[in-house]
Structure formats: structure tokens, C-alpha cells
Image (spheres, grey):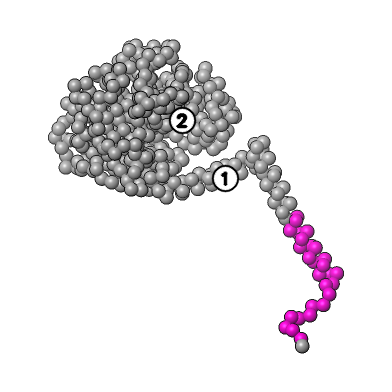
Amino acid sequence: MQGNTPDTGPQTDDSKADRGDRIFLLISCVGAFALIFLVGALSVVAGYFPGPAIERAYKGGMAWYDKLTHQQNVYDTDLWVAAKTDGKGVTRIDRARMQAGYTLYTSGDAPAAYLIDEEGALVHEWRLPFSKFHEAGDGGPEHPQPDEFVHFRNARVLPNGDLIALYEGTGDTPYGYGLVKIDSASNVIWKYAGRAHHQFDIAPDGRIYVLTHAIAQEVMPVYANLETPRIDDYLVTLSPDGKVLNKVDLLQSFADSYYRQLVYTVSAFSRADPLHTNTVEYIDAAKAVNFPFGKEGQVLLSFRETHSVGVVDPESGALEWLTRGPWIGQHDPDILPNGNILMFDNFGNFGKPEGRSRVIEFNPATTEIVWQYAGTAEDPLLSAIRSDQQRLANGNTMITESSGGRIVEVTPSGDVVWEFVNPVRGGDKGQKLPIIAWSMRLDAGAFDPAVLRGENTVNTMETSQ
């Protein structure tokens, strides 16, 4: 009885040859791909064509993937942190020893600025979603993050209730999103769509000094150690109505200065963002009196990746002075009336029971630390990124612990006399709170009460995200 399988008979020499040819072709293809991969890898390491193009394509793809994955859940970004306490709003207050006034702060939960009184009650709020600010082709991000990923990083309020605020978008590169001036009802007065980031400052004549950044594709011959693409920083001068007056390439300022060699010391981690400039402070006449390293009209800058602070002339672009000291990853250097510098040292307190962060006051001539606050083992100060501080009129220091989502005011002896914890909660079971991006204590008498009682004041302080 015959089966259903056809009898193909014995294999011929031709069929065996065809099979051998296919195996040979497969091996050849695998070998060719392996050779291409090896050549590509070696060209990337050696920096020869087409290595740089391959590396740029890879980095671009990874950045695109990183942006997509960061958009999945805003509570997984660095704008939200685990709440260390159930406390909300003002949790500690010593009226006799604290500096009276309003506190203006910005938060990671929204493009908004909040003005609160000493008890933590909301006095006024400014809010403008980035989607209402952004227009395609205006020089800002081509594909910005959704609104919930964009917040006000820095802000300044004027006596008439107008506010100037800086947008940042987490999970994007570059992350600087622009600068806006709005009135007390949050209506746009003007906007600057350049890639503003971190901080800005306002001179007495109304000019604005702001940090911007951009992706650079070109190799800088003097700094062949740096990667491409990389993020380059700029200092931009704006008129009081937001028009560009001048722009300084800060990496070029280093290259043209006595401090050129310092950029060669940046770590491998920093070669794609070699300066990471994070502070700009205008040196006015009062600050220049006891600060011999900068003149009125110049600006003090903080360069995180070189662990340095320096003075740049915004007209000539010259890096006039620079110093390094016993700090790591610093933010927000402020020139004090006595000529010292007050600064948040994010990582300089390593190996101590309090926390890795501290606020220091140092002599810029010697870098000697003359005062510091690092919290206690029971109440540590810890913020890996961001953070700032302000020396108050009564001698106390107000500190923004960004990664803790709180603000504290401490006496010279280190006693906490006022503490404010971000009252917003979100994430799984409301276990996270947004960072406090920046804060400043202000004189309540400097504002027109009628302006601050505007109809747009909406109390969203207890709203869960």
C-alpha cells in the first residue's frame, strides 16, 4: 500500500551544491555584517569617518527614545520625589526669630509661581501653561513636552504684580524652554522663545541677563576632548521688553581666557555638557563695593561641571575671574554685602551624618568657608540637583531644598525658625510631592494689595495631581 509522501529519490549532486551555496551565502552575509559592525565600532572609537556620523545617529536615537519613555509618567521624572513627611504647608514657625514677609516660589507640578504669607496661605498665583506660550517656528522646541512635564524653574515678581518666569521641560534636550513676562492676571506681555534655562537676573535699568543653551555639532579645535553633539551655554542680554541685545558664547569665553585648561578637567560624564552653567547674578553698585573680583555691570556665573564660579563681562564676553573650592556640583552663588559668596553646595558634605548637601559662605579670595549649614542627622539637607538660598535682612538664611520639596529658614546658629513643605501630592496613593524649584523671601510692603487681590487668584495649594 502506497503512502501519501512522494518519492523524491536520492539527492543529486546539483541539489547538494545549491544547499552548499546557500550556506556559504549565509556565512558570507554574517561575516560581512560582522565586518561592517567592527569597522563602524573602530571608526567610532578612533573618530574617523563614518564613526562620528554613526555616533551622532546613535545618540540622537537614544535621546529620542529617552524622551519618549520619560513622557509615560510625569511622577517618574525628577520633578517629583518621595514625600519624607506627611506635613503640608508651614510646618514650623518661630515668629519672633523669622524674617517677616511673603515667599515667592516655583514648583515642579506646574508652570506657576505662588506667593504665600508667613502662615503658608496663598496670597497670589500666576499660571501660564506652556502650550499657551509656545508657537511653532518661534525658536522654541519643535516638539515640546506635554504641559505636565513643563514648569516654571525661576521667576521674579515686580511691584506692580507683573511676573517674569522661565520655563523648563523635563525629559528633553535642550530642556530650556523660554522666558515670559505676564501681568498679575497671567496675560502675556512679551515672550522670549530662546532656550532659556536655570536662572535669570534683572539689572536696575530693567535689562535681563539670562542663560540659554543649544546643541552644537561642530568640533571645537581648542577642546577636542569634548563630545559632539554637545550642549553649549550662552549668556544673553535682553532689553526690558524682551528683545535680544547681546549674546556671549561661554565656552568660547573659557577658550579665550587664562582659565582655558579647566575645561580639559571635566569628567567623561560631562563631555557632552561641559559647563552646565546654572546661575547668573548681576553685579550692581552695592555688590561691587566689597567684591574686588567683579565690576558693576558684570555678572557672576556658576559652572557646575568645572566646579567653579566666575565673573563674565556681558559686553566683551571676557571671563575676568574664576575660582574653585571645596564644593561639588554647586548652585546659586550670591554676592553678600561683606564681599563673601553664599552658595548651595549640593555634594560637598559627603561622608557626614547630616546629608550630602550644605549651604556655605566663603571668602572668594581664599575660598575659606566662614559659615555653613548642613542640617542634622535627624533633619538632613539633601538635594542632588537644583536648590538655592538667600541671606535675609535679619541675618537668617532661607534655603530651598529642591529634592526635599521644602523651604527652611535658619538662624546663624543653625536653628530652623520656619519650614514650608510643598503641599501638593500625587503619584501612586499620593506618596510623592513636587520639587520646589526656587524661592525668594520678599517684603510684603513692596506690593500693591489691590493688585494681589486680583480675581485670578485661585487657591490650588491642596489640589492633588
Disc 1 is placed on an element classified as helix
User: Is residue 94 rendered to the left or right of residue 229?
Assistant: left
Disc 2 is placed on an element classified as loop
Is 113 above or below relative to 5? above
Residue 457 picture location, percent across and down: 19, 41
Of residues 35 and 80, the one drawn nearer to the viewer in this rendering: 80
Residue 254 picture location, percent across and down: 50, 23
Q: Do callouts 1 and 2 mark residues in contact (Cβ within 8 Å)?
A: no
Of residues 350 and 459, the one drawn nearer to the viewer in this rendering: 350
Regarding residue 388, the answer to whether it shows in the image is: no
The magenta segment is: 2-28
The image quadrant of residue 372 is top left
Sequence-wise, the earlier of marks 1 and 2 is: 1
User: Can you tell which mark lies on residue 29?
Assistant: none
Is 289 above or below relative to 13? above
- How many numbered discs? 2
Disc 1 marks which residue? 57
Q: Amino acid at mark 1?
A: Ala
The image quadrant of residue 91 is top left
Identified at 29% across, 41% down, the residue is 424
Please identify, in this view, whether the residue under mark 1 or under mark 2 is nearer the observer: 2
Indicate whether residue 41 is drawn in magenta.
no
Identified at 34% across, 39% down, the residue is 83
Q: Amino acid at mark 2?
A: His
Regarding residue 68, the answer to whether it shows in the image is: yes
Indicate whether residue 19 is drawn in magenta.
yes
Disc 2 marks which residue? 276
What residue occupies the far bottom of the structure in this picture? Answer: 1
